[in-house]
Amino acid sequence: MGSFNLVLCFLLTFLLVPHTAFAQQPAIKKTQKTFQLMENVIGSANFNYYLNASGDTVLHGGFSFVSENVDSLGRFIQRRVNGTYHEGKKDKVWQYIHNTFEVSINTVNERFQVQTSLNGTTQKLEANYDMGEASGMWKLEEFMVDDGKLSKQLKNLQVNFQESRLIGPFSFFVHSPPNSTQIKGQFNTRHFFDGKWELTYRKDSIDYHEERLYDDGFLISLVQKDNSNGITIFEVSFDRVKQKLQDAREGKEGIDFKIGSDFFDVFFDDGFPYFSKEEISQKNGNEILNDLFSLISSNTLVIGLKLEGSPELLPAATRRFEYTLTAKERELLDKAEKSVNRYISDLEKFVNNTSLALYRQRSDSLSFSFRYAERILGNLQIVRDNLDLLHSDYFKYQSKRTYFRPGVEGLLAYDTVRYSYDGQQRSKVIPNEVDFSNSDLIIQNLFTYVEKKGAIIETLDPFFKSSIIEIEEFLVSQQLEEDILMYLKRVEETYDVKRGIDAVDKDGVILTRFHVAMYSNYEQKRDLLMQEYTNLIDFEKKQAVGLEILELTKVYIDAYAPVGEVRKKLQQLDEAYTRMSYNPYMDRHDIKTRIKRNIYFAAIDHLLPSYRENIIDAESYEEIPRLLTEMDAAFQRLFELAKLPDSETQVIERRLRRESNPNRIKRILEL
């Protein structure tokens, strides 16, 4: 739909733009002059106009424009525009014709008469206006022209407007094999989707057919099939929506919602969870509808006319239910927000305390309590986010029952607290007493959850305070310890594994599973050294271990960026060992073929994974820089081999045919 989008956006924008109108009409003048329709499009225009009291030109009466030229590709381009202005506003029928032809000379007779053949496309848009407002049918058609005659229809769009809003039947068709799209439906008098809508389109090499049923802007059913084999991909009946519509229309007592009056975009939402079938079943069809409606509603292209005051064409929309909270729910929300903010503040003072962070390995109970406090803090932050959501204007159109049907994301039935002590990874499982399975009681349950966690915080408070006093009695304020804390934080911030796999940091490095595995290995080494450091009394020995901790952190900080490059290098390696072969069926080179297979798979399946495992499982952190350097050298050697002619690598290829031992692979690759 690329070329269609550009042309349709051009057509709709040009025909949409009115001039400023004045009620008084002085003498009408008629003129013919050169007129710039858009950038690089200049032609001849005939129009009537008058001058208003300020001396500005106001179009009034017939308007016509013709432009004919040959573009840089040698194609004959013809544009014709005809319509009527009434006091500067577009009125009645406007017609736009855009022809693109390739003209070939067949012969020239003895009288120097030329016989030609004409091939290309012709587009025609008819748009109706009523005093500057889009009103009535707009119809766009595009046909192929073969040897001077209309042939295959390529595009067809028929829409209806009322005061520049879509209304009534809607149909759209574009034929551009293998990508064809057809949409049929209707809008009601309030400009909402209504009744049956059918969408046929191609996306990601799959031909889809959708049937949607709307009830005054509410989506109540959707069936999506693979058009090539008839297999049903989604069959969704929005039964809860149907029942709620019935309850709202009948004025049923005790319900907490009503039919909202606001307009929303094509995505119909009633608080559907992320990745639910109600959400993802709409995705592909909504993208097609959004692409089409953006052409109708967009008014950003002024096509060189620089005219302002254009009424925006407004697409049709979906509706949502508007929800209300009871007085009791609002009271609980306010109480929960005050409590959760107080408890978060209390916990942050402890988890951010330097002494606790540095000396939490002093005892099993302190190590566990510190991690448990961090876990509670994270949970309370989740609670606060959800309380803010429930208070927001956005949630006015979200159903608590539907949105929280799967519970509260991140708040589980059990809290598993993992911590380390004495060089061992330990864990404790603590059940949460609050059950979030009943979404109707979500506010009551969030309030109860905050109170339960608050009671635990009250018991942790004196324990942490006494631990801090005990630690600070033995704490020696030295620059080394400040450096340790700084570098420990830098490692944590550098890796930041809580972001999740594939997250990108400020320097553009993507967090990979390689990073996460390395960070886990780092934590074990760090915790053992930290425990040794904490328990040492002798100053010199303590200094030596502290310096070792600093060296450990620097090694892992320096390793972060090179490890982040591994995924990119693997992709580059894949491209380097791939050649595009000729496809006789498509007459182009688009078949990917692996070259130097033995070299490539020996590296991918054996050599590079062995480096990764050795780096992750390194007994000593001091081995990591050397291993990273060796792995980088291996990549460079593989890139060099990819560029060499096959004749220069055939011996290596033969020797690596069934080789799986990383050390022998290194020798064969001369590493």
Image (cartoon, rainbow, N blue to C red):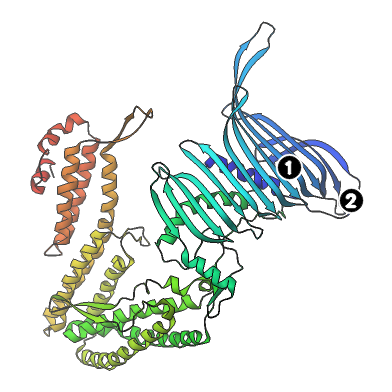
Q: Where is the C terminus found, in terms of image quarters? A: top left
Residue 626 visible in the snapshot: no
Amino acid at circle 1: Trp
Residue at the spot of label 1: 94
Picture coordinates of residue 388 (x, y %)?
47, 77
- As drawn, the residue found furthest toward the right would be 27
Q: Quadrant of residue 166?
A: bottom right
Task: Indicate left or right for 610 with 66 as reference.
Answer: left
Q: Is residue 565 above or below residue 506?
A: above
**Closest to the observer, 205 or 35:** 205
Picture coordinates of residue 175 (x, y %)?
52, 37
Residue at 28 percent across and 57 percent down: it is: 564
Q: Is residue 348 above or below residue 196?
A: below
Q: Is residue 462 above or below residue 436?
A: below
**Closest to the observer, 344 or 231:** 231
Task: Identify the mark at residue 354; answer none if there is no mark.
Answer: none
Residue at 41 percent across and 60 percent down: it is: 277
Picture coordinates of residue 242 (x, y %)?
51, 65
Q: Earlier in the sequence, mark 2 or mark 1?
A: 2
Q: Estimate how packed mark 2 is, as few (under 14), some (14 to 19) or many (20 or more) residues with alpha carbons within 10 Å.
A: some
Estimate the spatial distance between the alpha carbons at disc 2 and disc 1, rounded to whole Å.
22 Å
Task: Indicate left or right for 425 with 21 as reference.
Answer: left
Residue 636 visible in the snapshot: yes
Picture coordinates of residue 236 (x, y %)?
44, 58
Residue at 64 percent across and 47 percent down: it is: 159
Find numbered disc 2 in the image and state the secondary structure of the residue it sits on. loop
Residue at the spot of label 2: 25
Q: Quadrant of residue 507?
A: bottom left
Amino acid at circle 2: Gln
